Image (spheres, rainbow, N blue to C red):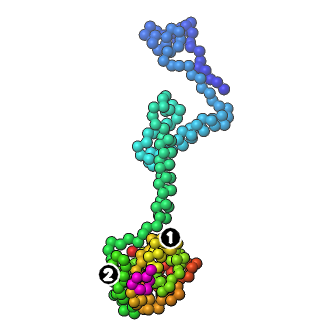
């Protein structure tokens, strides 16, 4: 249904004829120049307004997203509220591109976190801890090792200096390159544990080969000689295969001495070593 304004009064209507002073309100042609023609549509059915309602709600949603984005990422230029707000040129940066770049950077940083956390860190020490004050018998769990001299090509040390450590007591005639290789490999699977090979005698000819050979320690262990075999006798070392001593940073023996055979796994046994 269409409504149009009524026609202007004709010039023959004397009762409604404008006076000389009323020429601005009622021009001679019968129309006012400052009022455009009115064409009003009144829908017969409210469903005809569905498109206008949808546009109105879309504009509200766009405004809400713009307000939310301004809270999350302050400083971004505002999003256009509608087609009338779109710029005529592409000189301004597009907020969507900026957000995509930020998401890529965040994703890259997130991917690096597991790699950093999974990378094993060596046991670090700001300085040697004092030896533990304990009443446990030397050479037993919870006790200290006695201060026995150990010899090396570059000088000597005492057993209480080797901490934290895995001490591998080698038998007299040791054909145990494979065992040494397995032991050293496992001590460096997670957090590296300093590993020392201790052979009986002051100058054992096989010790240098076992510490340096890739088929044995491969340079990942340090070798010492036990001149009179005192340490092996104290802990009752196995005469046929390597015997392992796990020493904490304060000098205590944290696990019972154990023999090692090729193929043995040490994860659970080594996990008892406290990490500083």
Among the 4 quarters of the image, the one containing residue 58: top right
* Mark nearer the viewer, 2 or 1: 1
Mark 2 surroundings: few (<14), some (14-19) or many (≥20) residues within 10 A: few
Residue 223 position within the rendered picture, expressed as x and y whole percent measured from the top left? 42, 78
Look at 60% across and 35% down and name the residue there.
52
As measured in the structure, the alpha-carbon distance from the residue carrying label 2 to the one carrying label 1 is 35 Å
Placement of the N terminus among the 4 image quadrants: top right
Residue 83 on the magenta segment: no
Q: What label sits on residue 214 in the rendered view? A: 1
Circle 1 sits in a helix, a strand or a loop, which is it? loop
Placement of the C terminus among the 4 image quadrants: bottom left
Residue furthest front in the image = 205
Circle 2 sits in a helix, a strand or a loop, which is it? loop
Among the 4 quarters of the image, the one containing residue 50: top right
Label total for image: 2
Mark 1 surroundings: few (<14), some (14-19) or many (≥20) residues within 10 A: few
Q: What label sits on residue 153 in the rendered view? A: none
Residue 224 position within the rendered picture, expressed as x and y whole percent measured from the top left? 40, 80
Residue 116 visible in the snapshot? yes
Look at 51% across and 19% down and name the residue there.
35
Q: Residue tagged by mark 2?
A: 130
Among the 4 quarters of the image, the one containing residue 46: top right
Q: Is residue 87 above or below residue 169?
A: above
Look at 34% across and 76% down and name the residue there.
154
Magenta stretch, residue numbers: 199-205
Q: Is residue 110 above or below residue 201?
A: above
Q: Earlier in the sequence, mark 2 or mark 1?
A: 2
Residue 145 visible in the snapshot? no
Look at 46% across and 84% down and name the residue there.
169
Residue 30 position within the rendered picture, expressed as x and y whole percent measured from the top left? 53, 11
Out of 97 and 30, give the one closest to the viewer. 97
């Amino acid at each position: 249904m269409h409504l149009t304004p009524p026609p202007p009064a004709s010039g023959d209507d004397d009762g409604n004829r404008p006076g000389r002073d009323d020429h601005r309100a009622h021009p001679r042609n019968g129309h006012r120049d400052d009022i455009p023609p009115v064409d009003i549509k009144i829908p017969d059915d409210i469903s005809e307004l569905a498109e206008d309602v949808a546009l109105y709600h879309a504009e509200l949603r766009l405004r809400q997203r713009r307000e939310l984005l301004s809270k999350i990422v302050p400083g971004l230029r505002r999003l256009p509220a509608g087609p009338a707000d779109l710029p005529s040129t592409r000189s301004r940066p597009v907020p969507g591109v900026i957000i995509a770049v930020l998401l890529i950077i965040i994703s890259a940083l997130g991917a690096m976190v597991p790699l950093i956390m999974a990378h094993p860190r060596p046991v670090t020490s700001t300085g040697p801890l004092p030896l533990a004050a304990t009443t446990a018998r030397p050479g037993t769990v919870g006790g200290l090792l006695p201060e026995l001299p150990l010899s090396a090509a570059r000088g000597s040390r005492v057993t209480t200096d080797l901490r934290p450590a895995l001490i591998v007591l080698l038998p007299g005639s040791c054909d145990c390159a494979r065992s040494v290789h397995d032991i050293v490999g496992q001590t460096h699977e997670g957090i590296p544990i300093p590993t020392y090979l201790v052979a009986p005698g002051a100058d054992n000819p096989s010790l240098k080969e076992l510490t340096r050979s890739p088929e044995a320690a491969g340079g990942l262990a340090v070798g010492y000689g036990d001149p009179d075999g005192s340490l092996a006798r104290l802990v009752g070392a196995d005469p046929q295969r390597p015997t392992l001593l796990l020493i904490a940073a304060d000098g205590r023996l944290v696990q019972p001495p154990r023999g090692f055979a090729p193929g043995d796994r040490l994860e659970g046994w080594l996990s008892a070593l406290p990490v500083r």
